[in-house]
Image (cartoon, rainbow, N blue to C red):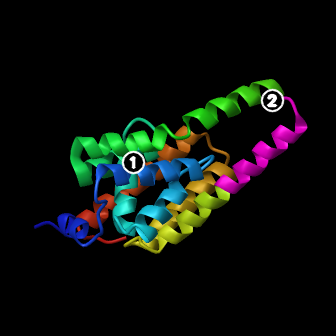
């Protein structure tokens, strides 16, 4: 039995596809501007369906796949617990409940997009979403197996984007290449 399988067995699991739908529906309605930080708190801490390390591993895979990370995670977790039916339930729970409010907000925004109040509200929501992502990042950084080098990579990425003002593609190439080099050294047992 692999360690990965072991970690799945020690966690709680959703009892049904309906429970998957309900939890992801609640996430989607609670996370205006970004569900990922709320999903981490709910799935890891409250439901106990996955560990923090498993959340990080699933998120890493979700980021490689095309599409929104949280949708990819919903599909992967739904499939893990209840197969195709669970994947469909989790994704439907994530997408269907906010559909009407989002359509209503889009209509309202099209009518009052030029309003300074609307612009200020959107800026405030963006700052709140950034704060939630930062809090999740700091909380999850405790689960990293090699926090020093991983933290340095995160700082290097921030420096490349914010201080050096490199275009995202160049910053990704720089930090991505460095992280691949570090991962290769770790696998060969040379450390870092």
Circle 1 sits in a helix, a strand or a loop, which is it?
helix
Residue 102 in magenta stretch: no
Image point (69%, 34%), residue name = 105
Q: Secondary structure at mark 2?
A: loop
> Which residue range is magenta in the image?
114-129
Give residue 28's position: percent from left, percent from top.
Answer: 52, 47
Could you say which quadrant of the image residue 108 lies in? Answer: top right
Please state the horizontal and vertical placement of residue 123, each as a whole percent of the image.
77, 46
**Circle nearer the viewer, 1 or 2:** 1
Q: Earlier in the sequence, mark 1 or mark 2?
A: 1
At a point 80% along the width and 45% down the height, the residue shown is 121
Total numbered badges shown on the rendered structure: 2
Q: Residue furthest right?
A: 116
Q: How many neighbours does mark 1 have within 10 angstroms: few (below 14), some (14-19), or many (20 or more)? A: many
- Any mark on residue 21, and which? 1
Residue that numbered label 2 is attached to: 113
């Amino acid at each position: 039995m692999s360690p990965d399988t072991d970690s799945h067995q020690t966690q709680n699991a959703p009892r049904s596809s309906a429970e998957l739908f309900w939890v992801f529906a609640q996430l989607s309605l609670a996370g205006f501007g970004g569900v990922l930080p709320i999903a981490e708190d709910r799935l890891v801490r409250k439901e106990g369906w996955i560990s923090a390390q498993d959340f990080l591993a699933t998120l890493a895979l979700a980021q490689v796949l095309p599409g929104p990370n949280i949708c990819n995670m919903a599909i992967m977790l739904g499939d893990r617990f209840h197969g195709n039916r669970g994947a469909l339930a989790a994704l439907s729970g994530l997408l269907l409940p906010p559909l009407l409010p989002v359509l209503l907000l889009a209509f309202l925004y099209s009518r009052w997009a030029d309003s300074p109040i609307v612009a200020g509200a959107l800026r405030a929501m963006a700052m709140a979403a950034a704060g939630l992502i930062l809090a999740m990042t700091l909380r999850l950084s405790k689960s990293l197996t090699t926090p020093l080098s991983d933290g340095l990579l995160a700082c290097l990425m921030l420096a490349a984007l914010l201080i050096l003002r490199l275009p995202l593609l160049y910053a990704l190439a720089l930090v991505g290449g460095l992280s691949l080099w570090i991962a290769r050294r770790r696998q060969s047992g040379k450390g870092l």
